[in-house]
């Protein structure tokens, strides 16, 4: 059966829920398609308090932000959240194919907002496929949602915010963290997190890499080494660390499958995690009526995802005739300035550089025509 | 340090013990909690290997735990290639490893 709707949002994380709330506030009818059983995306496993300004919900735990966003969306008569709704396809005529609670649902939205999030990167090294090598997000899911420890002694690879926060959460769950290693010469995450972990007795070692993981049916140890400025292992620095799990916190890639299917112009921007769609200041892609928001449009963090979601939701509603032109630009200006504030600082500089490059970076189609394989 | 893998006490979160159900893994009876992912139930029961890779027969466990990576594909109730990390556990489920181990 074919159903029509005004706005469909794919993904019920921070970006998707914010987009839905904003579009519904403007008066549009919105359907959120979320493949999970409970809305909130990765927020539902984030037990730490957020940073930033009060207006951006700093000081609130991710799990509580998820509940508030969920309630906000549920508060609109025009908004519906479908859980266990996996969007498999977007056809050439704009129809979405959705597996909803085991049934095939076809939905034809007039506007589409893709807020599909990201997937975790892995590392290619001997033994990285042995059971017990997990993404940091997987460890969060297992521990904070399902209440199961990933192991008894974990080596954390990566000292960005996710690596630091998940290491802290492991300690909270009474799991031993052997150490945190980081290939860069500096700690990427907030130092307040790093110093908290160090005070709890976990070493954070920069200029260190992982060379090999041992074990057959499960991880038993990992071989690490110091690296020099040329990223080569320092002779004599190699050692084995005993552990039954290795947690990889080495970055995320935008989940862009639906954008490729949709025919959005995509470009490789390493600063933002991989292939991302070109879009305008309203978060509309090169396919009219198709918007993006959150990690799917480039890896940042949840606060920025929520702002992008609101911009996309507002813009989708405006393009359907909701919200006067003046009210639209007033609200857009407010959201854009909040987003700009979030992007202040050294990490924000990298993101801004990536976004600036997005406009000029060759698209995938251009790369293929020129015979290049891109940077991937 | 912790004894079992189930978290009983946590400074921020509370985990209500779920309804215990029995299911079958490779012919033996395993107890898990109703509604949790099959992969989580197996992990809590100290099972790490969920399948063997097709070419080299190497043991594989889950990686992403949210249905993205397909490392955790298992045979569940006779259906192959089911993502065990996002499949809710029910009583009486028949869960099997996929692929064959290569003796090294």
Image: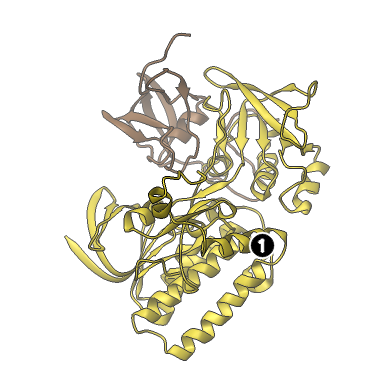
State the hue of chain A: yellow
Label 1 SS:
helix
Is residue A296 rendered to the left or right of residue A10?
right
* Residue A206 in picture, x, y percent from top left: 77, 39
- Expressed as whole percent of the image width and height from the top left, the position of residue B102 reads 42, 12
Tell which of A327 and A352 is nearer to you: A352
Judging by colour alone, the chain drawn in brown in this rendered image is B
Residue tagged 1: A348
Residue drawn at x 59%, y 64% as measured from the top left:
A303
Q: State whether residue A178 appears in this view.
A: no
Q: Quadrant of the N terminus of chain A?
A: bottom left
Q: Is residue A40 left or right of residue A251?
A: left
From what the image shows, is residue B13 above or below residue B82? Answer: below
Depth order, front residue of A31/B2: A31
B44 sits left or right of A210 in the view: left
How many marks the image carries: the answer is: 1
Q: Is residue A92 left or right of residue A285?
A: left
């Amino acid at each position: 059966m074919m159903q029509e709707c005004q706005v469909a949002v794919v993904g019920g994380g921070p970006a998707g829920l914010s987009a839905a709330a904003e579009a519904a506030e403007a008066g549009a009818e919105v359907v959120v398609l979320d493949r999970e059983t409970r809305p909130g995306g990765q927020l539902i496993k984030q037990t730490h308090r957020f940073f930033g300004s009060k207006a951006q919900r700093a000081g609130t735990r991710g799990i509580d932000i998820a509940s508030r966003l969920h309630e906000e969306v549920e508060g609109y008569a025009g908004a519906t959240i479908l859980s266990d709704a996996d969007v498999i396809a977007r056809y050439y005529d704009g129809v979405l194919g959705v597996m909803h609670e085991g049934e095939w649902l076809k939905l034809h939205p007039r506007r589409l907002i893709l807020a599909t999030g990201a997937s975790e990167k892995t590392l290619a090294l001997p033994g990285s496929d042995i059971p017990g090598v997990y993404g940091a997000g997987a460890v969060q899911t297992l521990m904070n949602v399902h209440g199961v420890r990933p192991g008894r002694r974990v080596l954390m690879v990566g000292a960005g915010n996710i690596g630091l926060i998940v290491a802290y959460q492991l300690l909270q769950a009474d799991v031993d963290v052997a150490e945190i290693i980081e290939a860069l010469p500096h700690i990427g995450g907030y130092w307040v997190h790093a110093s908290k972990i160090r005070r709890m007795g976990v070493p954070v070692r920069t200029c260190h890499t992982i060379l090999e993981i041992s074990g057959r049916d499960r991880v038993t140890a990992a071989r690490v080494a110091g690296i020099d400025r040329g990223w080569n292992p320092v002779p004599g620095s190699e050692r084995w660390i005993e552990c039954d799990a290795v947690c990889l916190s080495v970055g995320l890639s935008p989940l862009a499958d639906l954008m490729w299917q949709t025919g959005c112009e995509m470009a490789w921007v390493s600063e933002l995690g991989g292939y991302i769609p070109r879009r305008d200041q309203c978060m509309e892609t090169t396919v009219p009526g198709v918007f993006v928001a959150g990690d799917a449009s480039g890896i940042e963090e949840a606060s920025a995802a929520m702002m992008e979601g609101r911009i996309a939701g507002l813009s989708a509603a405006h393009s359907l005739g909701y919200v006067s032109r003046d009210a639209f630009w007033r609200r857009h200006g407010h959201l854009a300035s909040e987003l700009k504030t979030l992007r202040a600082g050294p990490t924000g500089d990298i993101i801004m550089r990536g976004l600036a490059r997005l406009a000029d970076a060759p698209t995938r189609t251009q790369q293929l025509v020129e015979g290049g394989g891109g940077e991937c | 340090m912790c004894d079992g893998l189930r978290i009983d006490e946590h400074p921020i979160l509370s985990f209500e013990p779920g309804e215990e159900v029995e299911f079958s893994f490779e012919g033996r009876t395993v107890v898990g909690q109703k509604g949790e992912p099959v992969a989580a139930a197996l992990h809590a029961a100290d099972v790490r290997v969920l399948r063997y890779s097709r070419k080299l027969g190497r043991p594989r466990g889950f990686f992403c735990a949210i249905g993205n990576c397909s490392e955790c594909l298992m045979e569940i109730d006779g259906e192959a290639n089911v993502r065990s990390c996002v499949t809710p556990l029910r009583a009486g489920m028949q869960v099997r490893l996929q692929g064959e181990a290569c003796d090294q």
